[in-house]
Each structure stands twice: as C-alpha cells, then as structure tokens.
C-alpha cells in the first residue's frame, strides 16, 4: 500500500523528533519544518496528503498559515490537523473556522493522533473495500496495478499508471507541472515540464477511444486537473 505523506509544521524540536519517530514507525512518510516559511518552500515542491501544524509558531501563526493554504488553488484541498496547547472551546472553534479539519490539544497520545489522521483522510477520495478506485466504467485496481474500462484492459506504461493513479486519488484538484514531477518521478531526477506534457498526452491518447481523455483538463497558466464530474460515464 502507498505510504501517506505527512507535513509536520512544529517549532519545538523535541515534539518534531517525537512525531517523526512515532509516525514513521506507524508507516507514514514524514516531512517536517520548524516554521511556516520552511513549510511554504516544501509545499512549492511537494504536496503532502495531510498537514499537522502547531498553532503557536514563530513568524506567521498556524491559524494564519491555515487561512493562507485555504486560499491557494493548488493547496486548498490538503487536510489539516491543528496541534495546540489552547484547550478552550472558543480556541477550538477559531481553529476549525480558520479551515483546519481537526484539532488536537497538547499533551496528546500518538495513538489518538494516528486515529485522527486516519479519520480525516477517510473523508477524502473513496477507495472501495476491494482496493479499487472507480470513475464511471474506468476502474483502477491498486493491488494489481491495472486499469480497466468496461471489460477492456488499458495497457499503461509504469509512469502513465503512476500519473493516472495520482490524478484519480486527487480528483478535482489542480497541480502545477513541477508538483506533478515531484510526485511521479524520483526526487533526485531532473525532469523538465515538457516531459510531463508528453506523458499526459500519451495517457490521454490511451484513454481517448473510451472517452476518458476529456477528464484530464489543462488549466491554462497553472497545470492539470482531473475533473471527475465532466465525464462520469466516459462517452
């Protein structure tokens, strides 16, 4: 199964170390930063599956950062869990109203945090019990790394499959070419924007006979987006 990528924004080194150790052992991939400035740099290159952020941070606060994320087209879908020592009800309401998906007060147990992470993530893309993602008649089988449309197997190259998998697990969300490169290719690979354009063109060509090429939209001046509601049945 694909590991979940978590971005932790926390200025206390001891807490970052504890979270990195405990969540890595729980089979998450961890990226961490000590302030929002570092977090912005990370988000320019990588899109995590979920962000865990402290309320009280040097410079821009966690609340301000959450509001900023919710106003960014390529980031506003990311689930956010806020960590804070503020246990008062009005503080919790303020955190949730700023755009956080959940709120957990310090001190907290790792088991509770993991449960909160899983609960928040379940609100996203729905994967069936058989580990399949479906858009109309197009079915991506995660365990077998196969894609079928109706009764027809679609022969995809590994990079084409990774690209389609990413789009199907991040539906109706726009990503820049640079962000797609970071998700699809190894971190230390040098890949230019043209490579992504070519891969998407090839993927569309393989989906075109079934009408599913149209769900992958070019967002002019930004990047690409899989628009699920455009073509639910393919043709």
Image (cartoon, rainbow, N blue to C red):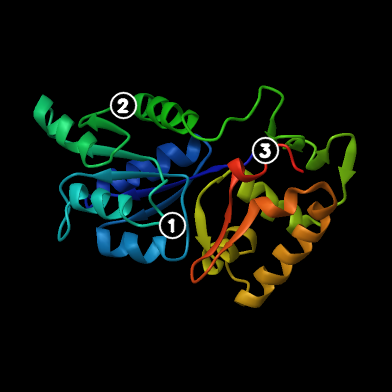
Q: Secondary structure at mark 2?
A: loop
Q: Secondary structure at mark 1?
A: loop
Nearer to us: label 3 or label 2:
3
Front label number (3 vs 1): 3
Q: Nearer the viewer, residue 205 or 92?
A: 205
Residue 40 in the image: above or below residue 235: below
Q: Residue furthest top?
A: 129
Few, some or many residues within 10 Å of mark 1 (<14, 14–19, 20+) = many
Residue drawn at the location 38% of the way across and 27% of the way down: 116
Residue 147: image location, x then y, percent: 80, 42
| The disc label shown at residue 109, or none | 2
Image: 233 above or below 175: above
Residue farthest to the right?
152
N-terminal of the pair, mark 1 or mark 2, is 1
Say which mark, if any, is on residue 74. Answer: 1
Q: Does residue 13 appear in this view?
A: no
- Pointer 2 local density, CA inside 10 Å: few below 14, some 14–19, many at least 20: few
């Amino acid at each position: 199964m694909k590991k979940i990528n978590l971005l932790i924004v926390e200025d206390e080194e001891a807490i970052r170390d504890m979270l990195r150790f405990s969540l890595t052992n729980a089979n998450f991939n961890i990226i961490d930063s000590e302030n929002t400035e570092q977090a912005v740099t990370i988000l320019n290159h990588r899109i995590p599956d979920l962000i865990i952020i402290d309320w009280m941070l040097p410079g821009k606060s966690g609340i301000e950062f959450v509001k900023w994320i919710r106003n960014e087209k390529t980031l506003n879908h990311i689930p956010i869990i806020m960590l804070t020592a503020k246990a008062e009800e009005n503080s919790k309401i303020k955190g949730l109203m700023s755009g956080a998906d959940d709120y957990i007060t310090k001190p907290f147990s790792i088991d509770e945090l993991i449960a909160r992470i899983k609960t928040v993530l379940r609100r996203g893309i729905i994967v069936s019990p058989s580990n399949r993602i479906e858009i109309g008649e197009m079915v991506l089988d995660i365990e077998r790394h196969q894609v079928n449309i109706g009764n027809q197997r679609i022969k995809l190259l590994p990079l084409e499959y990774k690209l389609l998998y990413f789009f199907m697990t991040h539906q109706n969300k726009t990503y820049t070419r640079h962000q797609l490169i970071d998700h699809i290719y190894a971190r230390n690979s040098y890949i230019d924007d043209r490579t992504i354009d070519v891969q998407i063109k090839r993927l569309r060509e393989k989906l075109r006979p079934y009408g599913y090429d149209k769900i992958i939209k070019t967002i002019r001046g930004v990047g690409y987006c899989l628009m699920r509601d455009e073509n639910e049945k393919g043709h």
